[in-house]
C-alpha cells in the first residue's frame, strides 16, 4: 500500500478553493504522537483543546469543532476510533465523543508500516504540509504539533504533481522593486536582498499560480503575518489596495504597534508601472480563507 499517496488523497470538503485543513491537522498531530509513543491512544477529551487550538490558529476563520476530523478521518483508512463500547466512532457530536470515552489512533496497518520504515513518517508529513499550508508556516506548524522532521526524511514529491516555478521569487521582487509592499523595507547585503520574500496571495497549495498577479514582495515578518491571517488586502476601489489588519491581533509593545497595528488602512506599495497588481480573485480568496475576523478601523500614527 502506498501510504504517501493515500495521505495525498485525503477526502476533504472543498468548493471554490475553500480551505478545510481539519483532517490534515489531526493527521499531523497523530503522526507526532506516534513519533513520541507508537502505542499511545488519543482520548478525545484529553486532546480536544490541543486540536481546537490548532484549528483556530491554522484553519480558516469560520469556527468548527475538532470532533469533525476525529470522526471523519476514519473514512480515509489511516485512523481508527473506539469507545468504551467497542470499535467505531459514535459520530461527530462532542458530547458523544466525551461521554463514550472515544479514543483514536493510526490504524494497525499504518503503525506497522511506520515501524518498518521510519522515514515514511517524514514523507507523509511533508505531503500534508505541502498540500495544505504555505512554506512560511511549515516549521512553526511542526513545532505546534510537536513533530520532529529530519532533513534526510524529507523526500521530493512525485514528479507528477504540479511543480513550482522557480522564477516566481525573482519576478515578484523585481515587480515590487525589491521593497516590502507593506512597510517599504528594502535591506541588502551588497547587491543581495535579505529578508525579502515572494508571498503567494492565493496559496500554491490551493491552486495559486506562480505569477506576479498572485504575488507580493514582503519582508519576512509581514510575509508570516500575511500567511497567518493577521494582515490582508482590502478591495481596490480605484486608488489601489489598502492594508487590512485583523481585529484579532493584539500587540501592546511599541514594536507591535509600529510594525503591525499602524499599517491598518495604509495604501499598499504597488508594483512598478506597467505591472499588473494583485488580481481581485486572488485577493478575495485570501480574505475569505486566510484573513482572520474583521479588519481594524484605520488608525493614525
Image (spheres, rainbow, N blue to C red):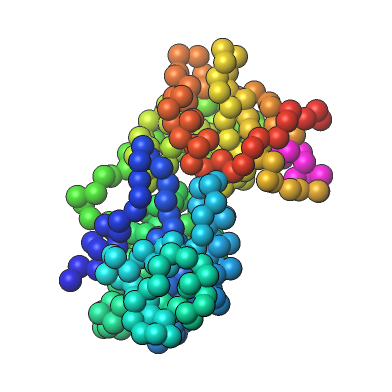
Is 200 situated left or right of 228 in this image?
Answer: left
User: Is residue 78 or residue 230 the one in the foreground?
Assistant: 78
User: Is residue 61 or residue 113 the one in the foreground?
Assistant: 61
Is 154 situated left or right of 256 in this image?
Answer: left
- Looking at the image, residue 155 lies above or below residue 115: above
- Looking at the image, residue 295 lies above or below residue 265: below
* Number of marks: 0
Question: Which of the 4 image quadrants contains residue 4?
Answer: bottom left
Which residue is at a point 55% across and 23% down the rendered structure image? 235
Q: Position of residue 92 (x, y in %)?
A: 43, 64
Q: Position of residue 31 (x, y in %)?
A: 40, 73
Which residue is at a point 58% across and 62% down the rendered structure image? 53
Is 53 situated left or right of 41 in this image?
Answer: right
Which residue is at a point 77% across and 45% down the rendered structure image? 255
Residue 200 shows up from this direction: yes
Secondary structure character of the magenta stretch overall? helix
- Looking at the image, residue 275 lies above or below residue 85: above
Residue range in magenta is 253-261
Q: Is the N terminus in the top left, top right, bottom left or bottom right quadrant?
A: bottom left
Q: Position of residue 15 (x, y in %)?
A: 35, 41
Amino acid at each position: 500500500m502506498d501510504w504517501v499517496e493515500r495521505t495525498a488523497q485525503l477526502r476533504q470538503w472543498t468548493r471554490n478553493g475553500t480551505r478545510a485543513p481539519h483532517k490534515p491537522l489531526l493527521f499531523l498531530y497523530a503522526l507526532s504522537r506516534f513519533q513520541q509513543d507508537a502505542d499511545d491512544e488519543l482520548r478525545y477529551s484529553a486532546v480536544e483543546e490541543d486540536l481546537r487550538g490548532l484549528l483556530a490558529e491554522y484553519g480558516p476563520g469560520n469556527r468548527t469543532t475538532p470532533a469533525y476530523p476525529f470522526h471523519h478521518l476514519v473514512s480515509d483508512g489511516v485512523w481508527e476510533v473506539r469507545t468504551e463500547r467497542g470499535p467505531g466512532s459514535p459520530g461527530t457530536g462532542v458530547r458523544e465523543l466525551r461521554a463514550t470515552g472515544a479514543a483514536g489512533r493510526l490504524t494497525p496497518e499504518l503503525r506497522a508500516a511506520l515501524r518498518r520504515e521510519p522515514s515514511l513518517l517524514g514523507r507523509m508529513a511533508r505531503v500534508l504540509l505541502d498540500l495544505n499550508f504555505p512554506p512560511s508556516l511549515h516549521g512553526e506548524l511542526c513545532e505546534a504539533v510537536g513533530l520532529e522532521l529530519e532533513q534526510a526524511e524529507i523526500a521530493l514529491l512525485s514528479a507528477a504533481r504540479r511543480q513550482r516555478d522557480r522564477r516566481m521569487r525573482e519576478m515578484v521582487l523585481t515587480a515590487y522593486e525589491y521593497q516590502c509592499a507593506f512597510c517599504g523595507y528594502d535591506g541588502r547585503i551588497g547587491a543581495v536582498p535579505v529578508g525579502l520574500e515572494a508571498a503567494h496571495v492565493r496559496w500554491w497549495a490551493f491552486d495559486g499560480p506562480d505569477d506576479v498577479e498572485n504575488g507580493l514582495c514582503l519582508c519576512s515578518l509581514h510575509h508570516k503575518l500575511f500567511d497567518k491571517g493577521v494582515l490582508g488586502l482590502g478591495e481596490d476601489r480605484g486608488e489601489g489596495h489598502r492594508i487590512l489588519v485583523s481585529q484579532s491581533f493584539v500587540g501592546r509593545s511599541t514594536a507591535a504597534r509600529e510594525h503591525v497595528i499602524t499599517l491598518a488602512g495604509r495604501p499598499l506599495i504597488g508594483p512598478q508601472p506597467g505591472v499588473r497588481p494583485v488580481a481581485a480573485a486572488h485577493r478575495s480568496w485570501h480574505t475569505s480563507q486566510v484573513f482572520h475576523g474583521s479588519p481594524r478601523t484605520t488608525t493614525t500614527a
